[in-house]
Each structure stands twice: as structure tokens, then as C-alpha cells.
Image (spheres, helix red, strand yellow):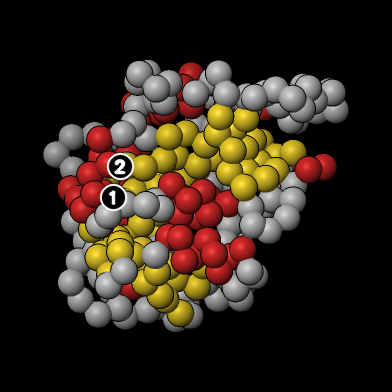
Amino acid sequence: MTNDGTRTSDQILQAQGQTGRESVLPVASTVVLARDGADGPEVLLIERPDRGSFAGAWVFPGGKLDPEDADGFDAEPSELDVARRAGVREVWEETGLVTDETGYATLSCWIPPAIVTHRRIRTWFFVALAPEGELTLSPDEAVAARWIRPADALALHANNGLSLFPPTWVTLEGLVGFVDAAAMVAATREAAPREFMSRSLASRKALLWEGDAAFETALDESPLPDEETTDRHRLDMSRLPWVYLREGTAF
């Protein structure tokens, strides 16, 4: 455990393995590519086709781990090692850009709520500097792409101009304010990866994570804690713009 209460990558994996609750989930890799634009750092978003789990949404490049992603290591690779390798493959398949896994900084690990209707997948998020080269989109994976500042993407979403899923939204929110792409990657590398084991508060259109006063009761009909409590770690999606709250004694 780090000084601010977040877990290292190894601690996240150990905790999931010890509980047995999430270790059997399929695993995916998502890569945030960052570059310097005229008005500040930009990230690459691609628009998914109108089918599948992320139909019509704007996401970062990525996808599920394939068995061959574990090939070629000198020793038995960790899940994180394989996820980085998968990220390289997915970025190339979807965008035509060639990246180096050694440049991937681990940002977070996302686990969807148990109530989701589509297949649940544990996803590792990485941040890396974008390589030189032209985008060549795979039509089966992406129908459009844009380089955009995180704050601009959030503003578009707030005005119904961009469809985003919660992991993408929260990731963008955390990348606002960096002076350049190098600083974005450096800060990610220096910080401990954050775990988002999500629970849904359907009645209030919110996702909750550990540290929120209602986290333990979000899966049943128990009364919620006093709304005056300051312990909050949630994404409020009841209206636009969405609001990310991370405050209280847990932090």
C-alpha cells in the first residue's frame, strides 16, 4: 500500500487472487496515447461501430488479451506483462500505430459492476506517448478517430456531443491540466495504479468505489449512509455534466 492508500499493481493482483471474486474474469488492455497539440496535450479517441458492447462510443484503443500475447517472454509473464503486450497489438490492429510496451505507464485497473448485462472484463489502462505516424483505422474496430484535449472531450460529452463510458470519462477527468504529454506519462508512472472495483447504485445512476460510504451497501437494499457524510468515491451520472467525487476521510 502506498502512502495515499492506493495499491501497487502487484497488490491489486494479489487482492483479486486472494478473494477469488474477480480473478476468473477475462482480461483486456486499454492504451491512452498522448501527444502535444497546439493548445496542450491531446489523447487519441476512436469511435466504435454501432454494434457490440461499446456501440457508438468513443474509447481509447484496446481490447481483450489473446493467448499469443503471452508468447515470447523469457520467464512466466504476469498478467500485467501480458496486458502491456496486448496493448501494443491492439493499438497496431486498430490504429496502425506502432508502440513500445516499455513506454507504457500503468494507470488503473477497472472491474465492472456485477449487475452489468454484457460480459464483464477486467481492464488495465496504460498511458504512453504517441508514436509518429499516420492513423490507419481498422473499419471493424473504429469508424472515426480524433486527437482531443481531455477537457474538450469532457465538455463535448456534457453537451451530448460525445458518447463516453464511465472508465473513459473518469480517465479523461484525471488527465486534465497537464502541461504536456511527457508530464502526463511521467505522473502516471510515478503514481501507484488505481483500482476501480465498481458497484452500481442504480436508483441514483451512480458508480461507487472503495472509500465511498455507500460502497458496502450498494449491492443490496440496506439503507444508505447519511447523505451528509463526506466519504465519497463515486461518479454521479444522474445528469449532465457527470460529476466525479473523491473526498473524505478515506483519502
Q: Nearer the viewer, residue 1 or 227?
A: 227
Quadrant location of the N terminus? top left
Find residue 55 and name its label.
Answer: none
- The answer for how far apart the CA atoms under marks 1 and 2 are is 6 Å
Q: Dots 1 and 2: beta carbons under 8 Å?
A: yes
In x, y percent, where is residue 69? 30, 51
The residue where tag 2 is placed is: 188
Q: Quadrant of residue 32?
A: bottom left
Instruction: For residue 89, say whether it is visible.
Output: no
In x, y percent, where is residue 209? 59, 32
Looking at the rendered structure, the secondary structure element under dot 1 is helix
130 up-or-down from 96: above or below: above
212 up-or-down from 36: above or below: above
Find residue 184 and name its label.
Answer: 1
Tell me the residue at 56%/29% (across/down): 247
In x, y percent, where is residue 127? 31, 51
- Local crowd at mark 1 within 10 Å, few (<14), some, or many (≥20)? many
Tell me the residue at 44%/39% (across/down): 109
Q: Quadrant of residue 133?
A: bottom left
Tell me the residue at 25%/65% (across/down): 36
Q: Is residue 221 left or right of residue 216?
A: right
Looking at the rendered structure, the secondary structure element under dot 2 is helix
25 up-or-down from 251: above or below: below
**What amino acid type should be assigned to the residue bearing mark 2?**
Thr
Q: Nearer the viewer, residue 194 or 242?
A: 242
**What amino acid type should be assigned to the residue bearing mark 1?**
Met
Tell me the residue at 69%/50% (across/down): 237
Instruction: For residue 225, say whether it is visible.
Output: yes
